[in-house]
Image (cartoon, rainbow, N blue to C red):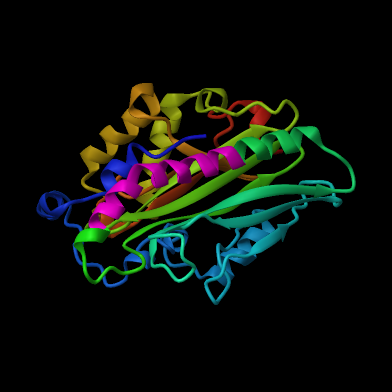
Amino acid sequence: MKSGMSIHKICKIGFMGVAACLFLYGCNSTPSNKENDNASNIERINEGESLAEKASIAEEESILMNAVTNEDGDAKEEVVENDGLDASQMINVQYVDDSVYVNAQSDAEKLMSIQYPQLEYHSQDSNDMIIKILDQVNNGCKGEADSYHSGYEDLARSEYKEITDWEDGSYFYYSKAYLRNTSSKIFSMAEEISSYAHGAHSCCYYNTFNFDVMTGNEILFSNLISDKEALYSALKIALLEKYDASVFYDEDTLSETLHDYVFDPSFGELTFTIENDGVSFWFGNYDLAPFAEGCQMVTIPFEGNEGLFQKEYVSE
């Protein structure tokens, strides 16, 4: 699992930070709809593709993409089935509402909205390895949500006492599960997290979960990549082919940031998922570009890059 780079520190932008943000990054300090700023980042990274178009592509590639809520905004449960798993094997994706209220009364105002996914395995046959993997995924999703809760509850309660016109949505944490690969060899999922802490705007980042289904071991960046130099070049080319150069801070900064991601473990590993046809790399707010440019994602295909990835993770 790869977590965002100290993202909770970034997302809480106070009054002093607003001016600095505007000066350095050109971000919008007065969003018209804070909760929706990053709710559709999965659309933005695909350059405006509609959900219907992505759903069609996902079906063709056996990639699973799940919505967090139904049209009414209520949490829902989805049963997801993928051709990569045996037909009797299914994964339920259920979204847990762990919101915090001002007090215990049923009609109390909501202090913090918190929602995150939990996965369940349902099958006629037991599969201890899949259950073990899903337990780790669930612990990771819950742990990230709990971190937001514990990190901001005291601050939210303090601000609530000082603000007379408190609004729901002043603090929120919503995450979506995107199952990218559930084959007999690999489990891969991206978690898109949108959070807000009563600052200038919300922000989005990604956690990813990649496991070897045969062993139950997590697939790390170091396990996956066989040629870092080639990956660095391929990532830069793919990003500049998919996005206009003006999206990024500047080309030199893009080069330096990608180099740090690929070659410097202390900088933080790249967030990736292993697809049927390649490896996708996910970048949240501020990773490569100003907030206003949203998130970015590119896929490096297996075909044509045979020497870049370890052979055991390359789909034939």
Is residue 156 one of those drawn in magenta?
yes
Which quarter of the rendered picture does the C terminus lie within? top right
Task: Name the one closer to the observer, 50 or 205.
Answer: 205
126 displayed left or right of 263? right
Image: magenta residue range: 138-159
**Furthest residue toward front:** 105
Q: Would you say residue 283 is visible in this rendering?
A: no
Question: Residue visible at 13% across and 55% down?
Answer: 22
- Above or below residue 298? Residue 51 is below
The percent position of residue 209, horizontal first and vertical second, equals 57, 38
- Measured from the top left, where is residue 259 in percent x and y? 33, 30
Residue found at the far bottom of this picture: 72
Q: Nearer the viewer, residue 204 or 170?
A: 170
Give residue 200's quadrant in the image.
Answer: bottom left
How far across and how far down the image is residue 127, in percent? 82, 37
Look at the image and tell me whether residue 9 can be seen.
yes
Most common secondary structure along the magenta stretch: helix
Q: Is residue 61 magenta?
A: no
Asked whether, in this view, residue 231 is left or right of residue 159, the answer is right
The residue sitting at 77% across, 39% down in the picture is 184
